[in-house]
Amino acid sequence: MKRIGTIAIALAVCMLVAAPTFAAETKVRWNMAMTWNSTLTPFVNAPMKVAQLVSDMTGGNFVIKIDGAEKHKAPLEILDMVKGGQFEMGHSASYYWKGKDAVTTIFTTVPFGMNADEQNAWLYYGGGMQLMQKCYDKFGMYAFPGGNTGVQMGGWFRKEIKSLDDLKGLKMRIPGVAGEVFAKLGVNVTNIAPGELYTSLDRGVIDALEWVGPGMDIKMGFHKIAPYYYTGWHEPATDLQFLVNKKAFDSLPPEYKAALKVAMQIAATDMHYENFAMSADAWVTMKTEFPSIKVVTFPEPVLQAMKKATDEVLGEYAAKDPFFKEVMDSQQAFMKKARAWTKISEQYYLQESEKVVK
């Protein structure tokens, strides 16, 4: 499936909106399942925007009904439900399928990996989309980026982490490769559905958790229980995911396929911007209304141990799975190239402008 660039999106939207009579007799009704409860903004806004855009671009003939996790009751089984045809689409995150195929984790994010700009560039212009599709072919579905959170915070902890010893025996919710990294460092790692996070922390089922960033975290109330809020290392560019059942997609009229692909890319981009804006606002609110929150960074020896464990985990998977190695090599090669530009552009600008802008 070919990527659609920004200019192509604009042209496609204009063409679709300007031709409301195409496939006028074709009525399509789809269902989409989300990992998230229906109130979890901005994650849920991406699927909702897709449904609205698709309806608008097809004159109301292509309708997508969205079910939140509170309705279908299977937040971490989206892949199976889309694969099995119970839902034509899903919205989730690829690293939740690590137990089925470890390669899926790479398409969400990896610790110490690319930032959002670098990762999106890799996906759309560095071969990432093609590799992701190769991965999901075996599941009988198409996969598309579903919205990027950017750098996520490192999590909420009941106690301060001063050394590696403080991690040993800690019970923490943290998914993906980062969960395996922490497990190597002695953490008792678990994966809990988003709707159960606060209750699990409150009842002592876990001692710590990572979620997203201030824009989403403050609303969840984690700070009331775990006041230590750590800066990020594990998810530098967390990409959510749209999954589409292949048979359902392939049966669509060509115009509907185009409308759906355009809608997904627009919605994914918009969610990234919205999440950034929410976190910027929440950061100000957090400092004024919740001064008890202690924003801290992991000590350097802990970060060094995390990086070493990350390299070990990725290396172990690559040694066992040639395709994992292919995807990881592609991502790391692109990051090396992209990071050189990131440093001289974004990093240099921030570093130098801080000297003169107060």
Image: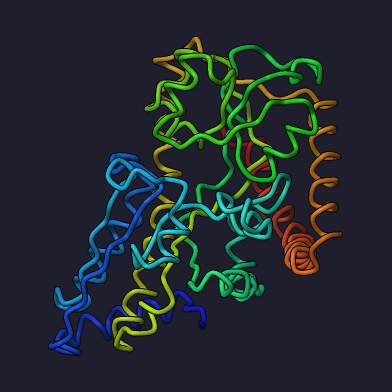
Q: Residue at x 13, y 88 (%)?
A: 25
Q: Left or right: where does residue 19 sit relative to residue 193? A: left
Q: Residue at x 74, y 20 (%)?
A: 167
Residue 15 in the image: above or below residue 44: below
Residue 184 is situated, as x and y percent measured from the top left of the image, at: 80, 33
Quadrant in the rendering for residue 221? top left
Quadrant in the rendering for residue 160? top right
Residue 319 is situated, as x and y percent measured from the top left of the image, at: 86, 59
Q: Residue at x 39, y 59 (%)?
A: 90
Query: Outermost residue, front direction?
Result: 84
Quadrant in the rendering for residue 289? top left
Q: Left or right: where does residue 51 sit relative to residue 151? A: left
Q: Residue at x 59, y 18 (%)?
A: 207
The front one of 300 and 316 is 316
Residue 338 is situated, as x and y percent measured from the top left of the image, at: 72, 62
Which color scheme does this rendered protein use? rainbow
The front one of 341 and 334 is 334
Q: How many marks?
A: 0
Q: Quadrant of the C terminus?
A: top right
The front one of 126 and 326 is 326
Q: Is residue 149 visible?
A: yes
Q: Left or right: where does residue 150 sit relative to residue 256? A: right
Q: Is residue 118 visible?
A: no
Residue 108 in the image: above or below residue 201: below
Residue 322 is situated, as x and y percent measured from the top left of the image, at: 80, 68
